Image (tube, helix red, strand yellow):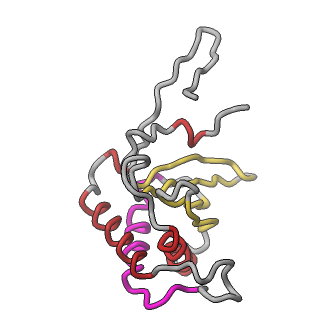
Amino acid sequence: MELIQSFSVDHTRIVPGIFVSRQDKVGSETVTTYDIRLKRPNREPVIDTAAMHSLEHIIATYLRNDPDWKDDIIYWGPMGCLTGFYLILKGDRSSRDIYELILSAFKSVNDANDVPGATAVNCGHYLMHNLAMAKWYAQEFASYLEAEKDSAATYEYPKTERLVTDDGQKFFDS
């Protein structure tokens, strides 16, 4: 079975940031998946589950209501490893091109007085939210983005080095 693209990222070297994870053609349109990484994998604590859930709700609502971006938003959701989120957009934009969108989305969390859709009717686990911690994580990430705005590491994935044989066979760590 072929290893998926996101597993070729060196998770021992990645830092928080905004990364193009993959680009796909859907019909005649390009769709770009972004890795919005808040935490250093395997080196710092992951995002609290309830706070992650709240960030998902608040930022998804923000993105889908942004007048300049709402028509290009396909998906916003958490990574299974709880170190960040995936954003899928229509179009072919660089990580730097969406910097202001991501920064403003995370800054908007501070203005939230409640978590949108956090009711039994609207959410599959409506009791699992933590707005206060969501605000803390959002502020931490927004501050990081502002401090590291000009750093290439904030936008460029560290790739793993893989041995490739003369016949093109790739070897991967187990």
Residue 165 sits above or below residue 160 on the image: above
Q: Quadrant of the N terminus?
A: top right
Q: Position of residue 59 (x, y in %)?
A: 50, 74
Which quarter of the image is occupied by the C terminus? top right
Residue 66 appearing in the image: no
**Is residue 105 rendered magenta in the image?**
yes
Q: Could you say where residue 55 lies in the image, as x and y percent from the top left?
A: 49, 73
Q: Main secondary structure of the magenta part?
A: helix
For image coordinates 39% across by 61% down, the residue present is: 99
Indicate yes or no whether the magenta region holds residue 134: no
The image shows a total of numbered marks equal to 0
Image point (41%, 38%), residue name: 158
Question: Which of the 4 quarters of the picture holds residue 29?
Answer: bottom right
State the residue lying farthest toward the left: 147
Q: Give the magenta range.
A: 94-116
Please state which of residues 55 and 60 is positioned toward the viewer in this rendering: 55
Residue 117, horizontal then vertical, whole percent: 61, 86
Q: Residue at x 55, y 81 (%)?
A: 65
Reply above or below: 6 against 88: above
Residue 11 lies, with reference to residue 98, above or below; the image says: above
Viewer-nearest residue: 93 or 21 = 21
**Residue at 39% over, 81% down:** 132
Q: Position of residue 45 (x, y in %)?
A: 40, 57
Q: Nearer the viewer, residue 51 or 58?
A: 51
Q: Residue furthest top?
A: 166
